[in-house]
Amino acid sequence: MTRRNFVLAVSVVMAGAMLAATAPVGAAPAAPITGTIVSATPDTIVLNTAQGNKTIKTTAKTTVIEQSPAKLSDIKKGEWLGVDAKKSATGTLTAVSIHIFPAQSTGKFRTGQWTMTSGDTMTNAQVTQTVSQVSGHTISLAYEGGMAKILVPSSAKIYRLVRSSVTALKPQMHAMVRGQPNADGTVTAAAITVETMTAMH
């Protein structure tokens, strides 16, 4: 998988974790638009997608999130995570990717555990402890109505999410946009997720 496709795949997975923070209650979520930023101004960005260039309008309500690579040791007790995991036949959960949510988003995103369209299990919950063992690592998470223990192999991708601003958007950034389509073919962005320029592990 190319770096570009990997980044976009991770962004789409993360959309499931952050959806409740960006979508109106009761609204059917629109499919995310992914691509590379061609140009950016304080109120408009042009995104190069697989279907061609798309004009994205931003407003004062547009949420911008940057994601950067992190390590398992960066995860602290009390933080909130979005964990995409595979479930085995015995019910064991093994993390594929982990996103550490911004502190400012606490209480603004969907919490709990559910099955995504991919078949993976998404858990949005608070860290109660991390356990290091010779054979690997386990994180324990708590959410209203349940608990989860998830194995974290060395192959799991871990990212920290940070609140940013529209003015931080730059050409060549890979971005995922969720928003409302307009009659003129543009999209008014509710949320934009970009990868920082930090090198991938």
Image: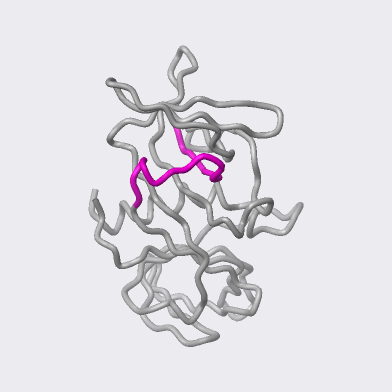
The reply, left or right, for residue 56 in relation to residue 94 is right
- Who's the residue at 62% across and 79% down the image? 59
| Residue 71 shown in magenta | yes
- Residue 99 appears at what percent x and percent y? 46, 47
Relative vertical location of residue 17 with respect to residue 38 in this rendering, above or below = above
**Would you identify the image quadrant in which residue 115 lies?**
top right
- The magenta-colored residue range is 70-85
Between 129 and 80, the one nearer to me in the picture? 129
Outermost residue toward the top? 90
- Please count the marks in the image: 0
- Residue 100 appears at what percent x and percent y? 48, 49
Between 181 and 87, the one nearer to me in the picture? 87
| Residue 137 shown in magenta | no
Relative vertical location of residue 56 with respect to residue 97 in this rendering, above or below = below
- Residue 172 appears at what percent x and percent y? 31, 74
Q: How is the image coloured?
A: one colour
- Residue 75 appears at what percent x and percent y? 43, 43
Relative vertical location of residue 89 with respect to residue 87 in this rendering, above or below = above
Relative vertical location of residue 10 with respect to residue 124 in this rendering, above or below = below
- Who's the residue at 55% across and 47% down the image? 17
- Who's the residue at 51% across and 29% down the image? 140
The reply, left or right, for residue 172 in relation to residue 108 is left
- Who's the residue at 26% across and 55% down the image? 200
